[in-house]
Image: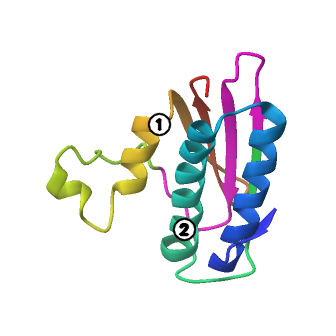
């Protein structure tokens, strides 16, 4: 669990690097995971909570024997389903403030689902072997 504060990005990165080392995920795979988690976390803080807060963000990571990674990401920000929007599909759209996180989800995650349950956004992502 991490408080929804940008100051927590270092702690999040350390958590991820420890996971990658234990799971045997190489540097490139770990960087891909970091990019995705940092985007999710930053969006929670900036757009979900409109700034740093003590609201919790729960992140769990699991790696299968095939090095396929499953991410479960939960926050208490207002409901936001990244799969309910059309994705940006041009370079001009990608450059806009909104839509980059959605594009990353679609490009990096092999599978994903969203639910809003008990006051939490829950995003589950499956990434191909890293």
Res 48 quadrant in image: bottom right
- Residue drawn at 71 percent across, 73 percent down: 8
Task: Kindly give the residue lying farthest to the front in the view shown.
Answer: 27
Say how the picture is coloured. rainbow
Percent across and percent down for residue 63 are: 75, 29
| Nearer to me, 11 or 52 | 11
Residue at image mark 2: 42
- Residue drawn at 48 percent across, 72 percent down: 47
Magenta span: 61-81
Reply yes or no: does residue 77 show up in magenta: yes
**Mark 1 residue crowding within 10 angstroms, few (<14) / some (14–19) / many (20+):** some
| Nearer to me, 102 or 64 | 64
Residue at image mark 1: 108
Percent across and percent down for residue 27 are: 62, 41
| Nearer to me, 59 or 77 | 59
Q: Please, what secondary structure does the residue beneath circle 2 have?
A: helix
- Residue drawn at 79 percent across, 43 percent down: 19
In this rendering, the answer to whether 61 lies above or below 94 is: above
Task: Please state, as top left, top right, bottom left or bottom right, where the N terminus lies in the image.
Answer: bottom right
Task: Please state, as top left, top right, bottom left or bottom right, where the C terminus lies in the image.
Answer: top right
Image side of residue 36 versus residue 5, left or right? left
> How far separated are the C-alphas under marks 1 and 2?
17 Å
Task: Kindly give the residue lying farthest to the top in the view shown.
Answer: 66
- Residue drawn at 67 percent across, 65 percent down: 76
Reply yes or no: does residue 11 show up in magenta: no
Q: Which mark is residue 10?
A: none
Percent across and percent down for residue 61 are: 75, 41
Image side of residue 74 versus residue 115, left or right? right
Q: Is mark 1 in CB contact (under 8 Å) with mark 2?
A: no
Percent across and percent down for residue 31 are: 57, 47
Specify which label sits upstream in the sequence, 1 or 2: 2
Would you say residue 110 is visible in this rendering? yes
């Amino acid at each position: 669990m991490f408080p929804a504060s940008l100051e927590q990005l270092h702690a999040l990165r350390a958590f991820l690097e420890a996971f990658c080392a234990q799971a045997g995920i190489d540097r490139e795979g770990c960087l891909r995971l970091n990019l995705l988690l940092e985007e999710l976390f930053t969006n929670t803080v900036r757009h979900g909570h409109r700034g740093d807060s003590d609201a919790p963000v729960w992140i769990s990571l699991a790696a299968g024997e095939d090095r396929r990674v499953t991410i479960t990401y939960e926050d208490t920000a207002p409901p936001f389903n990244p799969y309910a929007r059309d994705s940006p599909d041009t370079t001009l759209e990608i450059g806009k403030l909104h839509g980059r996180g959605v594009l990353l989800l679609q490009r990096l995650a092999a599978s994903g689902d969203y639910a809003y349950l008990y006051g939490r956004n829950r995003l589950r992502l499956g990434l191909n072997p890293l």
